[in-house]
Image (cartoon, rainbow, N blue to C red):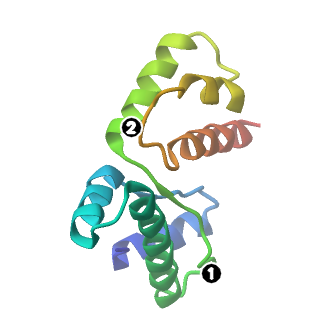
């Protein structure tokens, strides 16, 4: 759900050219609930979560007259994101020029990843772009 306040923040950020990221958190909880309530597999629950979230966000953005209803929404779980950041920090602590390959190497064997890596890379790339 995107509130009226969220829409106002998006509009103001756009007006002042401040990058924004739409993030749907607690994906693991939602996946578990979908599996239980719909009696579906984890893979099916993930697909449903992605589809439902994207449709809901698009509908909310359109209803709020936001100029980019196709804006990317990142579906993440805070525990998975925390695990990735923790591992990454240990492996690449002094590396300020982080690459997508560095990040992909870090996430081997981290379960439950949906958009966590994409979010982190997009955040880093956006920060780099704004510095130059």
Label 1 packing within 10 angstroms: few (<14), some (14-19), many (20+) = few
Q: Quadrant of residue 32?
A: bottom left
Element type where label 1 sits in the image: loop
Q: Residue 118, percent across and down?
A: 59, 45
Q: Residue 102, percent across and down?
A: 66, 23
Residue labelled with disc 2 = 80
Q: Residue at x 45, y 27 (%)?
A: 85
Q: Residue at x 61, y 28 (%)?
A: 103
Q: Is residue 104 left or right of residue 77?
A: right
Label 2 packing within 10 angstroms: few (<14), some (14-19), many (20+) = many
Of residues 22 and 53, the one drawn nearer to the viewer in this rendering = 53
Residue labelled with disc 1 = 67
Residue 72 visible, this orientation? yes
Of residues 121 and 35, the one drawn nearer to the viewer in this rendering = 35
- Which quadrant holds the C terminus? top right
Q: Quadrant of residue 56?
A: bottom left
Of residues 83 and 17, the one drawn nearer to the viewer in this rendering = 83
* Label located before the other in sequence (2 or 1): 1
Residue 99 visible, this orientation? no
Q: Residue at x 59, y 56 (%)?
A: 18
Q: Residue 11, percent across and down?
A: 53, 73
């Amino acid at each position: 759900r995107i509130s009226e306040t969220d829409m106002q923040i998006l509009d103001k950020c756009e007006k002042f050219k401040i990058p924004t990221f739409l993030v749907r958190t607690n994906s693991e909880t939602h996946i578990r609930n979908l599996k239980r309530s719909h009696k579906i597999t984890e893979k099916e629950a993930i697909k449903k979560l992605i589809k439902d979230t994207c449709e809901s966000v698009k509908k909310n953005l359109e209803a709020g007259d936001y100029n980019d209803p196709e804006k990317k929404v990142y579906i993440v779980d805070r525990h998975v994101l925390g695990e990735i950041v923790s591992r990454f920090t240990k492996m690449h602590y002094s590396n300020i020029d982080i690459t997508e390959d560095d990040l992909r190497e870090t996430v081997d064997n981290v379960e439950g990843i949906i958009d966590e890596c994409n979010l982190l890379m997009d955040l880093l790339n956006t920060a780099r772009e704004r510095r130059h």
